[in-house]
Amino acid sequence: MLVLPLLALALLAGCAQPADAPKPVPSGASTDDGDTLIRLTRSDWFNGDPTYSVEVDGSGAVRYVGEEHVEVLGQASHTVAPSVVAGLVSTLRRAGYDALPDSLSETRGGDLGPCSSYWTDSATATTMVKTGGGEHAVFHYHGCVSDFHLTLVALEDEIDRALGTERWVREGWPETRSPSPTERRSSRQ
């Protein structure tokens, strides 16, 4: 007879959550589970475009390293609200970032890969997004004309705006960024 109450108690204990268990996050709220990280690295190729990297974690800590053609060389940091980070993650998900190819550039051996055509001497950007659900990075050569190009340019610029890189790169950034060949061509249509 003592076995049944002990069995019931064991089952109930197995269903209960420990007091320190994480609580579900309501939709639209932000959290820093230690897993969220968004990084953007821009590199120049003959055009004098800014070369720097910027990243933000889920708590909103922004870290920047300026290398060339920027107002602030070296390291700098500031903080944005965690809701800004959650908004960026949401924007990237809605845009289908996780489904983008890992590389938008010409492959070795001259294969155009996802590019329908290829312009030389363009800048590059690499984005990386890490959340509790995994990690995805995209290398983006701005001379790669593809279906994904304009979407990726807009996402890169949104990361810059949300993280406030203008304070370190130059006034008006990223709006003052040199347009890629695809952007120049689409603005004439």
Image (cartoon, grey):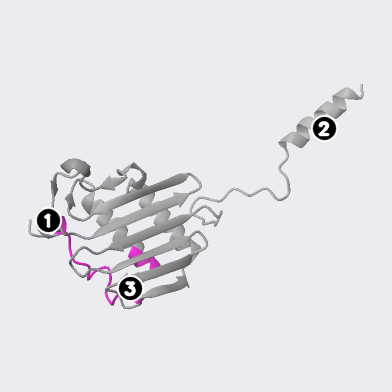
Question: Quick one: which residue is furthest to the top in this view?
Answer: 1
Residue at 74% across, 34% down: 14
Looking at the rendered structure, the kind of residue marked 1 is Ser
- Which mark is on residue 9? 2
Q: Are marks 2 and 1 in contact (CB under 8 Å)?
A: no
Instruction: Judge by depth and name the residue closer to the eye, 46 or 154.
Output: 46
Give whichever of discs 2 and 3 has the lower sequence position. 2
Residue 110 % position (x, y): 16, 43
Q: Residues within 10 Å of mark 2 (few under 14, many from 20)?
A: few
Residue 100 % position (x, y): 31, 44
Q: In the picture, residue 71 is in which quadrant?
A: bottom left
Q: Which label sits in the foreground, 2 or 3?
A: 3
Give the answer, above or below, for where 74 lies relative to 40.
below
Local SS, label 3? helix
Give whichever of discs 2 and 1 has the lower sequence position. 2
Mark-to-mark CA distance, 2 and 1 = 68 Å
Instruction: Give the residue number, with chain letter if any, for mark 1.
Output: 186
Quadrant containing the N terminus in the rendered view: top right
